[in-house]
Amino acid sequence: MEKYKYLNIFKFLFDGYYERVLNICERYSEFLIVWKTLEVVLSRVKMNLELKGRNGFFNNLTYQTLVNCFLKDIDNEVVREKILSLMIFINKIPENHSEYLYFHCLDLLEKKQDDTKIKKITLLAGRLYYSSLRPDRIVTIYDEQAIQNDIMSRLS
């Protein structure tokens, strides 16, 4: 009987394997299968991405990839929804990435005011952004009102 070798999670992170997975996601971002693969990987390494120190680099790299691909494939509904679910799954989106995503969505909404799909995306991005500002990561009614104000100001 052959023994299987398992890759240690820290070795996976620090030897560049995780970065290769993210590069594949960026290269083939329009395909749902790469995001499902990343979901499996993230479910295994999630705790390690939240650690302090060098692992903060992996958290940043993950969100940078997710945000860039989300914006690149914003018209691909299936991929867009999967990427959003991954952002919510990790639930530690850094403020700078969520801010970039939210304000980019607001700009897009300003250009495509009649697109209800963009309005929904902007609302979700706003919730991610405002939750990133709170220590408990929970959106309040005041945040919801601020999001509504942001959206209305862009639409008028």
Image: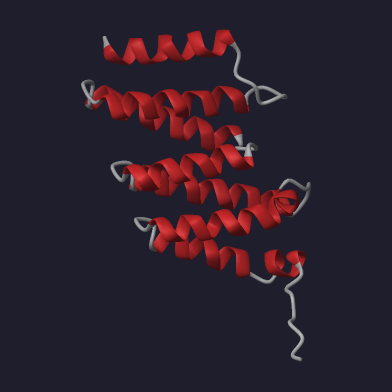
Q: What is the x, y in percent for residue 14?
A: 71, 66
**In the figure, residue 114 lies in which quadrant?**
top left
Of 17 and 90, the residue lying toward us: 90
Q: Is residue 144 above or below residue 102?
A: above
Is the N terminus in the top left, top right, bottom left or bottom right quadrant?
bottom right
Residue located at (53% from left, 38% from top): 97
Is the C terminus in the top left, top right, bottom left or bottom right quadrant?
top left
Residue placed farthest to the front in the image?
A: 1
Q: What is the x, y in percent for residue 60?
A: 61, 47
Of 35 and 133, the residue lying toward us: 35
Q: Is residue 67 left or right of residue 136?
A: left
Q: Is residue 99 left or right of residue 154?
A: right
Q: What is the x, y in percent for residue 100?
A: 46, 34
Residue located at (73% from left, 82% from top): 4
Residue placed farthest to the bottom in the image?
A: 1
Residue located at (41% from left, 49% from top): 69
Q: What is the x, y in percent for residue 85?
A: 51, 40
Q: Is residue 151 above or below residue 82?
A: above
